[in-house]
Image (spheres, rainbow, N blue to C red):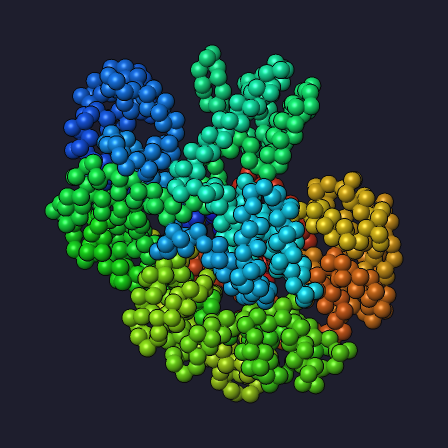
């Protein structure tokens, strides 16, 4: 082997590949055994944690439902076997074709019936008497005189336990669930969180009017919206648009999210509009929640009001759910008779509506999913929605030639379609709003009637429960999410189980509390669920609403505040914190400006900048405790503990109340109930240790401060603190070094990382590659350069297309630029607008940003026009739209790489920039960069470089830490993908992914070249240069 020499390793990690390269200090690829040491390792990408979790959850849900039905089967087994030995077997085999069925003895005779095979009662008789399962359920719920067949009783209970409704109102009585005021109170509370005053809706007279409007089945959505708006909209003109949006939302109309929250930025999201009555709303809900974060609670509360309306429409005045469903069946049957009778006068129209469409039209057969073929009913693949069926039916009705009476019938049918009440179906998407209490009400009625005829239902067994009690417990039983899977076999082998048992044995719904320690299981759940700190290895993050984390967020945001472009003094920042943020739960820019003006800090002419329209952070938990508990009752650490419990157990009020009551007996039942009713969702990125225990010396003053104190005492945000005159970054590295073990890396070390499975696989492959290289080279490298590609699903929330984004904005300025709007709407495609030049052309209303002159579109792609970077690329690599403008080439040449933009350009372009900002065509950040008058400071320039050196993902850090453990003498260097991309672009190094995978090895090589250049030039502190 050649004598060990100094060398570098470059790594380029993807979810299904690792590119690697080995060079000497002059960037020459090293050869060993006649082969150049660079290449690619390809492997199958692992599934993401989300994909695995969805599959796991679905599997468990199905298994738990099967278990419920199996327990019910055991309760009825003896009694049913007396009546019909083969009943369960026929039910089990009912899903197969006749020729594939087996009887109770395992033989395969042809069994024509799926359920009943008595001499005087077969499936035909059953379906004649009970056309749907709801007919049977209603009959048993109301029958108090005749003894029902035990098999019929089982079938009804089987259906209820299989489809038992949602548990969103767990623990509440049926009367509470059906109460309209419950849903309205939740809406009013969440609206108040967003500073929208809907308290008038809780007044008895207004509430009654609103309930009447919402429950009027003869009123269209549009009419409801108009009437509800009159009740909701107040006198505050600034809030009227939001109030109208909420009125539209709860009545099932389409609403822009930006109108609900008065936030124009939401128009840029891919899902910028919502409508509860749309078929696809449930699929979009998760994405909407990820965009809105805490604000989604208002949407959820509005959905609660809308769901109440849907539930009211389903139930009507029926006592039981099955009664309402039977009425639905009868209404559909009557509508079918009426329409068939009308259409028989035109055979062609009749066939079009009721026949099998070869063109896959949205006719009746497609609507119900069934058609007659060769005299037999058969399911069809292509189904249609109610809306599409209505459109099709209306067109067919218009083809009929009818008399006056016939026209009246057609008008009646069309009116019903407008209301959505023609041809109602039992099994619909809206059934998802039915709570378990409705099914439970029916279950109890059926059992009350049945126990009069079947004494065994009231006989206690060896467990001390009657069959009736066991059935009720089976129906209500849910394994709490904080207990998790009950099978502990794989608990110590990396399995997804953490439940703690009190004793061994089989767990049933009626002995759950005897077998499982819920408190201990909840504690284990907390340990599993807490995320890890972005900066400190192994440290648990704080809840998003933690008092400390909220303080960090507020201070981090306030430290960006500027008056006329100058950062505010720390004392003023502290004043705003104490007198504005501690006074108001939700702080707007207007409140801060008003406070500063009232106190003579700024005049009307002065500009307050450094924030969006409203502040994103708030002291929510501080205000909640102040309102509910008062001051001096709970210490800050006790409040933090309660916030953590609320975050973890928000979906289980029972457990939450138990924990608060046990730990803080000094609180009243009312206070505990109010606290348990709070919704604190999500986790922060930082740990308490990071904010309070990492200390640094200010190199200028010699003062020692932790991070939260530094944020309070200075006007610098976190990114500034992690660079420049402080050594927090060094302290973080030292702290992390103390947590790491040295020596050989095993797969178990990868398993323990807090990263997605999709990242764990390439990390392990990387470790094995580096291990092999070091064996070949005879020693550890001097430096290892790491760059990790984004994994699938990590690209953030998808945005709307550029074309749609521009069209929405141009609607507000059609008069000012009619030709541009017309061209954008009719000639430009999404594909064309991928060109940054063309997109900037439209976002600048066709004008040069430095002169205000019109740009000739025909000359756009010639050398007459350039895209310029406002922050020069020599200072910071920022290719975002916020940092780029379309300008005349000669003006760009004169500007060179200086900053700020010259006074000449500012004067010429200021009017245009202001117009573009008002129209929403440029962001506040872009406007701030264009209008800024002072050059970059030394700390700011150092910060740009520092961010490019240290801005890294969790998975990148995980790899780096593991490599540091295995190779303590090697320097681990982060190589930024953006820097490598810029290097490729500058030297025309083309990457063609479609040809082969060798570009991964080339990227690994470039990570060495580019990464080492940055590392050598700036070493570990950009401010030194």
* 719 relative position to 503: left or right: right
| Residue 632 placement (x, y as % from top left) | 41, 83
Q: Quadrant of the C terminus?
A: bottom right
| Residue drawn at (54%, 47%) of the image | 215
Above or below 228: residue 367: above
* 136 relative position to 1012: left or right: left
Residue 621 visible to an observer of this rendering:
yes
| Residue drawn at (48%, 58%) of the image | 181
In the image, 1008 versus 426, the foreground residue is 426
Above or below 732: residue 835: above
| Residue 285 placement (x, y as % from top left) | 52, 49
| Residue drawn at (40%, 40%) of the image | 321
- Check the image and name the residue furthest to the top: 374
Residue 837 visible to an observer of this rendering:
no
| Residue 851 placement (x, y as % from top left) | 86, 61
| Residue 773 placement (x, y as % from top left) | 42, 52
- Check the image and name the residue furthest to the left: 462
Q: Quadrant of residue 205?
A: bottom right
Above or below 903: residue 955: above
């Amino acid at each position: 082997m050649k004598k060990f020499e100094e060398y570098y390793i470059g790594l380029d990690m993807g979810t299904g590949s690792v590119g690697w390269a080995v060079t000497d200090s002059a960037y020459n690829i090293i050869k060993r055994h006649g082969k150049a040491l660079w290449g690619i390792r390809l492997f199958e990408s692992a599934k993401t944690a989300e994909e695995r979790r969805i599959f796991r959850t679905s599997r468990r849900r199905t298994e738990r439902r099967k278990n419920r039905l199996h327990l019910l089967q055991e309760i009825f087994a003896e009694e049913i076997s007396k009546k019909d030995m083969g009943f369960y077997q026929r039910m089990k085999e009912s899903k197969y074709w006749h020729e594939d069925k087996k009887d109770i003895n395992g033989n395969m005779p042809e069994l024509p019936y799926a359920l009943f095979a008595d001499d005087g009662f077969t499936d035909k008789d059953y379906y004649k008497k009970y056309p749907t399962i709801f007919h049977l359920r209603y009959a048993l719920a109301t029958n108090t005189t005749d003894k029902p067949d035990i098999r019929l009783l089982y079938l009804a209970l089987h259906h209820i336990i299989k489809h038992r409704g949602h548990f969103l109102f767990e623990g509440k009585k049926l009367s509470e669930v059906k109460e309209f005021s419950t849903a309205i109170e939740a809406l009013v509370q969440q609206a108040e969180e967003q500073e929208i005053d809907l308290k008038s809706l809780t007044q008895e007279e207004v509430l009654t009017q609103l309930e009447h409007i919402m429950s009027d089945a003869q009123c269209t959505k549009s009419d409801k919206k108009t009437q509800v708006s009159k009740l909701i909209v107040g006198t505050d003109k600034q809030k009227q648009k939001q109030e109208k949006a909420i009125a539209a939302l709860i009545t099932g109309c389409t609403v822009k999210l930006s109108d609900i929250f008065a936030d124009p930025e939401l128009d840029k999201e891919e899902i910028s509009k919502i409508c509860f009555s749309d078929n696809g709303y449930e699929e979009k809900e998760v994405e909407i929640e990820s965009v809105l974060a805490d604000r989604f609670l208002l949407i959820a509360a509005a959905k609660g009001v809308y769901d109440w309306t849907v539930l009211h429409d389903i139930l009507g005045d029926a006592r039981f759910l099955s009664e309402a469903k039977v009425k639905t069946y009868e209404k559909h049957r009557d509508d079918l008779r009426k329409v068939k009778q009308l259409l028989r006068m035109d055979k062609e129209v009749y066939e079009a509506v009721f026949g099998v469409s070869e063109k896959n039209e949205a006719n009746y057969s497609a609507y119900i999913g069934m058609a007659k073929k060769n005299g037999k009913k058969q399911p069809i693949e292509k189904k249609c929605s109610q809306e599409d069926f209505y459109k099709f039916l209306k067109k067919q009705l218009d083809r009929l030639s009818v008399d006056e009476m016939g026209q009246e019938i057609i008008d009646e049918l069309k009116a019903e379609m407008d209301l959505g009440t023609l041809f109602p179906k039992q099994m619909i998407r809206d059934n998802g709003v039915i709570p378990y209490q409705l099914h439970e009400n029916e279950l109890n009625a059926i059992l009350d009637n049945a126990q009069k005829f079947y004494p065994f239902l009231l006989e206690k067994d060896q467990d001390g429960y009657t069959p009736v009690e066991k059935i009720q417990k089976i129906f209500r039983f849910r394994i709490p999410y904080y207990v998790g899977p009950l099978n502990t076999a794989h608990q110590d082998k990396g399995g997804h189980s953490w439940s703690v048992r009190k004793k061994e044995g089989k767990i049933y719904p009626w002995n759950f509390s005897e077998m499982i320690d819920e408190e201990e299981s909840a504690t284990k759940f907390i340990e599993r669920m807490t995320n890890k700190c972005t900066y400190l290895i192994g440290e648990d993050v704080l809840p998003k609403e933690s008092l400390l984390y909220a303080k960090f967020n507020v201070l981090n945001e306030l430290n960006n505040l500027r008056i006329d472009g100058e950062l505010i003094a720390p004392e003023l920042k502290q004043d705003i914190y104490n007198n504005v943020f501690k006074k108001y739960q939700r702080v707007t820019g207007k409140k801060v400006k008003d406070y500063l003006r009232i106190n003579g800090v700024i005049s009307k002419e002065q500009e307050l900048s450094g924030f969006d329209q409203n502040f994103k952070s708030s002291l929510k938990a501080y205000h909640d405790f102040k309102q509910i508990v008062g001051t001096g009752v709970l210490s800050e650490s006790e409040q933090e503990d309660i916030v953590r419990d609320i975050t973890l157990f928000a979906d289980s009020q029972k457990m939450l109340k138990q924990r608060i009551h046990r730990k803080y007996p000094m609180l009243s039942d009312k206070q505990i109930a109010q606290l348990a009713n709070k919704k604190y969702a999500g986790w922060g990125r930082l740990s308490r240790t990071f904010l309070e225990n990492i200390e640094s010396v200010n190199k200028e003053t010699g003062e020692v401060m932790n991070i939260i104190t530094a944020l309070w005492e200075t006007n610098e945000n976190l990114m500034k603190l992690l660079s420049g005159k402080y050594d927090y970054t060094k302290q973080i590295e030292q702290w992390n070094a103390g947590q790491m073990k040295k020596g050989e890396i095993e797969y178990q070390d990868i398993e323990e990382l807090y990263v997605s499975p999709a990242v764990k696989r390439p990390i392990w492959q990387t470790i094995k590659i580096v291990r092999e290289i070091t064996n070949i080279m005879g020693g550890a490298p001097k430096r290892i350069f790491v760059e990790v590609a984004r994994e699938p699903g990590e690209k953030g929330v998808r945005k709307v297309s550029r074309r749609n984004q521009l069209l929405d904005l141009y609607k507000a300025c059609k008069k000012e630029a009619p030709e541009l709007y017309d061209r954008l709407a009719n000639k430009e495609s999404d594909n064309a607008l991928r060109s940054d030049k063309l997109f900037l052309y439209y976002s600048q209303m066709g004008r040069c940003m430095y002169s205000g002159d019109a740009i000739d579109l025909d000359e756009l792609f010639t050398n007459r026009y350039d895209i310029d970077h406002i922050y020069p690329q020599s200072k910071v690599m920022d290719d975002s739209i916020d940092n780029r403008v379309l300008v005349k080439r000669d003006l760009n040449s004169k500007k060179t790489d200086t900053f700020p933009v010259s006074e000449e350009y500012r004067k010429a372009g200021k009017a245009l920039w202001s117009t573009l900002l008002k129209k929403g065509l440029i962001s506040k950040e872009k406007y701030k960069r264009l209008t800024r008058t002072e050059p970059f400071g030394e700390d700011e320039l150092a910060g740009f470089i520092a961010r490019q050196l240290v801005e890294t993902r969790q998975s990148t850090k995980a790899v780096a830490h593991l490599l540091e453990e295995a190779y303590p003498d090697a320097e681990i260097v982060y190589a930024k993908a953006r820097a490598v991309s810029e290097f490729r672009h500058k030297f025309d190094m083309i990457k063609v992914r479609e040809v082969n995978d060798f570009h991964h090895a080339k990227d690994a090589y470039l990570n060495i070249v580019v990464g080492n250049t940055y590392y050598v030039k700036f070493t570990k502190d950009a401010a030194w240069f």
